[in-house]
């Protein structure tokens, strides 16, 4: 479907023509008509699917066509990080090229006082579109610089990352200032229960648009070690001693884990830095600057950097912890093999995570190559699902005392305790 088949206005279409945009992506085709019709929308789509244009184009078209107050903030777009806010602002400049009256301002932390003063002036005078990180916008709100009484559009981008970074209270405080008839759009790369709960509380009868997660690029070499938790750090030490592992991201499941692993890697004289939600915006900016500049070789991070960060030369992604689902796995390893480069993704699979990683392999449609543990580390767990272990246990129980089949009557069974075990899996996840 082409953009001209929608009822986006001529100024938007002229800008798209200049930018050589013709065919819509699937997320744009499903979202743009619904937003133009005034519906609240809940979109679930990966980074790189064109979701920014999916909400910016219809909103800009309506702002350009409609009679919205000139001295009001007509649209607020919330982004979890400064980098994403800047990317949205840049996209806005291109799409609104023929709309001089529809301007935008990006509002984010980590700046000097003069930047804050510029933001203050724009917010008080009324900026048609405000693109902001939650903490910075809330700072303006607390000192009376923010008036959302006439805001017509509210967009929450990368909602899952917002919640991971602890912005839920900020978001709720900001949305309380919106008028009841404000049209809301919410995008998320994944849909855990906490994001679903947020959507229920913010959106009114939304249209839900969900795209299937695409599989990782073929040029990413995917490998895994099946190991126990205490063996993981020794594997990293082995990898770093046997190869040039500059430009590496190590993903951990929790911020406390990031802090601990970063400390241990530093003791091994590995040039690393942590990235997690406890850091201030300025601290995160400093870490990312040093990593991009090559001053840091290894970034130890939560999923805060698995989406929306523009780094093209990552050589290796290491999943210190198995991601929660296939979507998170795809986002993490998608940080490598970008811009026509090759890349490698290595996942450490502990005994507790075997079932989860098998589900990821099912989504991938293939088995990820398992590497032998380095010499001296001993044996790792056996790569079997809980069902296979239960079947093996049941077979063994028939050989135990008191459970012998009749044809084996009188034979001695050595080395078996006859216990019957069955592991329950309480974390079944549907992979779409």
Image: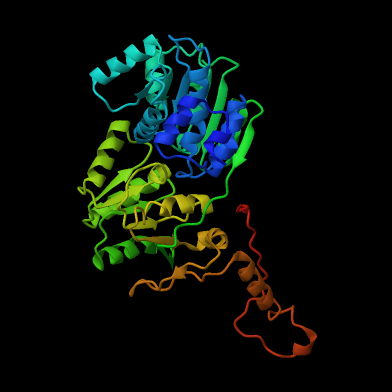
Residue drawn at point x = 60 percent, y = 39 percent: 209
Q: How many marks?
A: 0
Residue 294: % across, % down: 21, 49
Vertical side of 319 occupied by 136: above or below: above
Residue nearest the viewer, comparing 332 with 57 = 57
Vertical side of 202 occupied by 244: above or below: below
Residue 81: % across, % down: 38, 34
Q: How is the image coloured?
A: rainbow
288 on left or right of 148:
left
Vertical side of 290 occupied by 363: above or below: below
Residue 39: % across, % down: 62, 27
345 on left or right of 6:
left
Q: Which image quadrant: the N terminus?
A: top right
Is residue 87 shown to the viewer in this render?
yes
Residue drawn at point x = 56 percent, y = 59 percent: 363
Is residue 143 shown to the viewer in this render?
no
Residue nearest the viewer, comparing 70 with 13 = 13
Residue drawn at point x = 62 percent, y = 85 percent: 414
Residue nearest the viewer, comparing 325 with 154 = 154
Vertical side of 348 occupied by 383: above or below: below
Residue 90: % across, % down: 36, 31
Examine the image and state in which quarter residue 222 appears: bottom left
**Outermost residue toward the right in this view:** 406
């Amino acid at each position: 479907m082409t953009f001209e088949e929608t009822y986006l206005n001529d100024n938007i279409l002229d800008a798209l023509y200049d930018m050589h945009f013709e065919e819509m992506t699937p997320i744009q085709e499903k979202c743009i008509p619904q937003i133009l019709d005034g519906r609240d929308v809940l979109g679930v789509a990966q980074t790189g699917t064109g979701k920014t244009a999916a909400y910016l184009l219809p909103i800009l078209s309506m702002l350009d066509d409609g009679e919205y107050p000139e001295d009001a903030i007509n649209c607020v777009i919330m982004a979890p990080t400064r980098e994403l806010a800047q990317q949205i602002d840049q996209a806005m400049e291109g799409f609104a090229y023929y709309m001089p009256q529809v301007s935008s301002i990006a509002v984010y932390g980590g700046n000097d006082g003069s930047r804050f003063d510029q933001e203050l002036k724009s917010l008080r005078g009324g900026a048609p579109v405000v693109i902001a990180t939650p903490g910075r916008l809330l700072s303006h709100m607390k000192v009376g610089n923010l008036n959302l009484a006439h805001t017509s559009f509210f967009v929450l981008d990368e909602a899952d990352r917002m919640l991971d970074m602890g912005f839920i209270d900020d978001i709720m405080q900001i949305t309380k200032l919106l008028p009841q008839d404000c049209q809301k759009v919410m995008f998320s790369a994944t849909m855990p229960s906490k994001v679903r709960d947020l959507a229920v509380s913010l959106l009114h009868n939304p249209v839900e648009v969900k795209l299937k997660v695409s599989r990782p690029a073929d040029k990413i070499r995917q490998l895994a070690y099946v190991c126990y938790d205490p063996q993981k750090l020794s594997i990293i030490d082995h990898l770093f001693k046997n190869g040039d592992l500059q430009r590496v991201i190590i993903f951990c499941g929790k911020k406390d884990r990031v802090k601990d692993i970063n400390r241990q890697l530093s003791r091994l004289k590995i040039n690393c830095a942590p990235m997690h939600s406890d850091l201030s915006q300025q601290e995160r900016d400093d870490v990312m600057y040093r990593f991009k500049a090559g001053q840091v070789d290894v970034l130890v991070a939560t999923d805060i950097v698995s989406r929306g960060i523009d780094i093209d030369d990552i050589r290796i992604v290491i999943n210190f912890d198995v991601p929660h689902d296939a979507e998170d796995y795809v986002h993490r390893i998608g940080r490598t093999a970008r811009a026509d480069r090759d890349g490698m993704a290595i996942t450490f699979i502990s005994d507790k995570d075997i079932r989860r990683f098998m589900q990821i392999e099912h989504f991938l449609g293939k088995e990820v190559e398992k590497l032998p543990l380095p010499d001296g580390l001993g044996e790792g767990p056996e790569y079997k699902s809980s069902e296979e272990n239960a079947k093996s246990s049941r077979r063994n129980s028939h050989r135990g005392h008191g459970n012998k089949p009749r044809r084996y009557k009188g034979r001695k069974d050595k080395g078996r305790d006859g216990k019957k075990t069955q592991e329950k899996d309480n974390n079944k996840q549907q992979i779409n």
